[in-house]
Image (spheres, coloured by chain):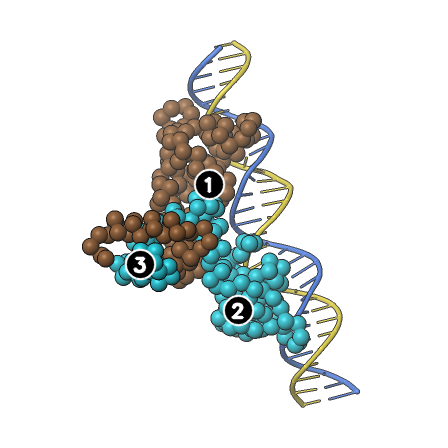
Chain colours: A cyan, B brown, C blue, D yellow
DNA sequence: AATAAAGACAGACAAGCTGTCTGTCATTTA
DNA sequence: TAAATGACAGACAGCTTGTCTGTCTTTATT
C-alpha cells in the first residue's frame, strides 16, 4: 500500500464519514472558510488519493463524487502490517503482547478481549 | 517522540544489537565497503539520533561510543501509540481486535495470548 | 442570449526532509 | 615526523507536501 500523508488522510476520513462527497463538501468540513485556492488544494489531494488507489471518482455529474476504495478496518490492518514489517520482521505477536501491556489497556479491555476470542473461536478453550 | 527516518532506524537497530558501538563498527555492519563519506553519513545520522534523544554518546574515548536511550520494547510501544493517535483517536483496543483477526495470527498465537493474559493477570478469570 | 458562478485540471512553488558527500581540524598511531 | 583515524560543520540534490495561480469547460442566473 502506498504511504499516505496527513493531508490525504484528513480527506480520506471525510470520505469514510460521508460517502459520495464532492470536493466542496470535503473542503467545507476541513476549512472554516473555503476559498478558491483551498478548494484547489483539496482537489489536488483527491487527485493524489485517486492515483494511490485509496479513492475512486464518479465523473458522471459535474461535481465529481468520491468513494473510498479501502475500508477503515482494512486500512488499519495495513498500517499495522507495515509497522510489523518495519519493526518486528513482519511478526505481529510482538505488537499484540506489547499492546495488552500498554497503559491504556485496562482490566475491562482484557475482559472484553477474552470474550472476543472466545466468541470468534469457540471450542479452542 | 520525534519521528525516526529509515536510515536512522537502521543505525538505532545496530546499537540495540551491539551496545557501545562506534561509528565505524556501525558503518561496517551496514555497508559492505566503508569509505570516508559513508562513515561521515553514519556520523551525521548518529548526530541526528542524538539530537532526537534516541541515543547518547560517550565522548571519553577518541572514538565515541553510543548507547540507546530507549529500549526496543519501549520504542515499539511508542510507535503503536502514535498509530493509535493517528488512526483511532488514541484508543488501542481497535488495534488489538484488528491484530488478533489478522491473517498471520494463528491458533497457536491465540493460545499463547490466552496464557499470557492468564499469567500476567491471574484471578481475573 | 449574455453574464456570472462553479468545477476540473495542469502546472508551479516554497519549505522541509533525507541521505550523501566534501573539507577541515584535532588526535592518535606507526 | 608522517600517516591514519575520528569528529564535525556545512553543503547538496532529490524528493515530498500542502498551497496557490491561471485556464478552460460546464452550469446557473439575469
Mark 1–mark 3 Cα distance, whole angstroms, equals 35 Å
Residue D21, x across and y down, in percent: 66, 65
- Residue B81 appears in view: yes
How many residues crowd around disc 1 within 10 Å: few (fewer than 14), some, or many (20 or more)? some
Does residue A7 lie above or below D24 as drawn? above
| Residue at x 38%, y 47% (from the top left corner) | A94
Q: Secondary structure at mark 2?
A: helix
Q: On what subunit does the disc labeled 1 rest?
A: B
| Residue at x 60%, y 58% (from the top left corner) | A52
Q: Secondary structure at mark 3?
A: helix
Q: On what subunit does the disc labeled 3 rest?
A: A
Q: In the rendered structure, which disc, 2 or 3, sits on the residue that comes first in sequence?
A: 2
| Residue at x 61%, y 62% (from the top left corner) | A50
Residue B31, quarter of picture: top right
Q: On what subunit does the disc labeled 2 rest?
A: A
Residue A123, x across and y down, in percent: 34, 58
Instruction: Name the residue carrying label 1.
Output: B9
Instruction: Name the residue carrying label 3.
Output: A114
Amino acid at each position: 500500500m502506498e504511504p499516505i500523508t496527513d493531508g490525504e488522510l484528513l480527506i480520506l476520513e471525510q470520505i469514510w464519514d460521508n460517502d459520495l462527497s464532492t470536493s466542496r463538501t470535503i473542503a467545507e468540513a476541513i476549512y472554516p472558510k473555503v476559498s478558491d485556492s483551498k478548494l484547489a488544494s483539496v482537489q489536488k489531494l483527491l487527485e493524489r488519493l485517486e492515483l494511490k488507489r485509496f479513492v475512486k471518482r464518479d465523473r458522471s455529474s459535474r461535481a465529481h463524487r468520491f468513494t473510498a476504495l479501502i475500508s477503515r478496518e482494512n486500512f488499519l490492518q495495513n498500517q499495522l502490517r507495515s509497522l510489523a514489517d518495519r519493526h518486528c520482521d513482519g511478526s505481529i505477536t510482538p505488537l499484540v503482547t506489547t499492546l495488552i501491556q500498554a497503559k491504556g489497556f485496562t482490566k475491562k479491555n482484557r475482559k472484553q478481549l477474552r470474550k472476543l476470542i472466545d466468541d470468534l473461536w469457540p471450542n479452542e478453550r
